[in-house]
């Protein structure tokens, strides 16, 4: 019986899903961990799954596997290698990722505490502020300088953008 190991594949830009589809069609076991993230799209906060490692896919291969088929898979750029040879990813790492991502998780906030933001709507449009936190109903608390005094406001996340 031959042992198999996980390896890391680097995908061509924008072809992560294509690479996964073709790996499935070739009956290769693969894993692309995903996590829930909040995004602002068309003025609304949405929750969607995104790749934890964008542009990379783990694939399980045997020593006798057709490595040329992997390298020729549509969407795959290369097998990640060190010193010219593919390096196996420890099974324990893949197992830990699978276990951790199987548990329900709260998505990361849209804005981090201390992050500089710019207000994009309303009477404070184009004014910079600093994020202080998030309310239970997912509004963002920001700190602004108005007339030499610090003021806190609660704003919808759709009214903010990262500064810079």
Image: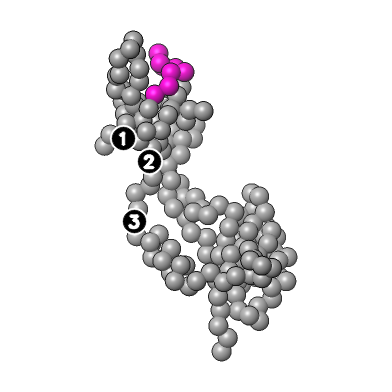
- Alpha carbons under labels 1 and 3: distance apart: 20 Å
- The residue wearing badge 1 is 134
Query: Which numbered dot is residue 104?
Result: 3
Give yes or no for residue 138 being in the magenta stretch.
no
Tag 2 secondary structure: loop
Asked if residue 127 is among those painted magenta in the image, a careful observer would answer yes
Image side of residue 111 versus residue 7, left or right: left
Residue under the point 37% across and 27% down: 130
Q: Nearer the viewer, residue 27 or 9?
A: 9
| For residue 111, above or below residue 8 | above
Are the residues at dot 1 and dot 2 in contact (C-beta closer than 8 Å)? yes
Q: Which residues are magenta?
A: 122-129
Q: Nearer the viewer, residue 8 or 22?
A: 8
The image quarter in which residue 79 lies:
bottom right
Residue at which label 2 appears: 109
- Disc 1 secondary structure class: strand
Q: From where the camera sits, is residue 70 visible?
A: no
Question: Compared to 86, does 115 lie above or below?
Answer: above
Question: Please, which residue is most extreme toward the front here?
Answer: 83
The first of marks 1 and 3 along the sequence is 3
Find the distance from the CA under tag 3 to the CA under tag 2.
16 Å
The residues bearing labels 1 and 2 have C-alpha atoms spaced at a distance of 8 Å
Residue 2 visible, this orientation: yes
């Amino acid at each position: 019986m031959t042992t198999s190991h996980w390896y890391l594949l680097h995908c061509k830009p924008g072809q992560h899903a294509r690479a996964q589809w073709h790996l499935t069609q070739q009956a290769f076991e693969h894993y692309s961990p995903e996590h829930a993230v909040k995004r602002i799209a068309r003025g609304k906060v949405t929750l969607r799954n995104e790749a934890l490692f964008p542009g990379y896919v783990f694939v399980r291969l045997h020593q006798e596997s057709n490595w040329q088929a992997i390298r020729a898979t549509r969407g795959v750029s290369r097998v990640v290698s060190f010193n010219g040879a593919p390096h196996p990813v420890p099974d324990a790492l893949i197992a830990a990722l699978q276990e951790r991502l199987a548990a329900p998780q709260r998505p990361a906030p849209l804005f981090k505490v201390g992050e500089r933001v710019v207000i994009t709507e309303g009477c404070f449009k184009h004014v910079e502020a600093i994020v202080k936190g998030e309310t239970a109903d997912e509004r963002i608390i920001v700190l602004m300088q108005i007339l030499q005094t610090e003021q806190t406001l609660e704003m919808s996340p759709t009214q903010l953008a990262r500064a810079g």
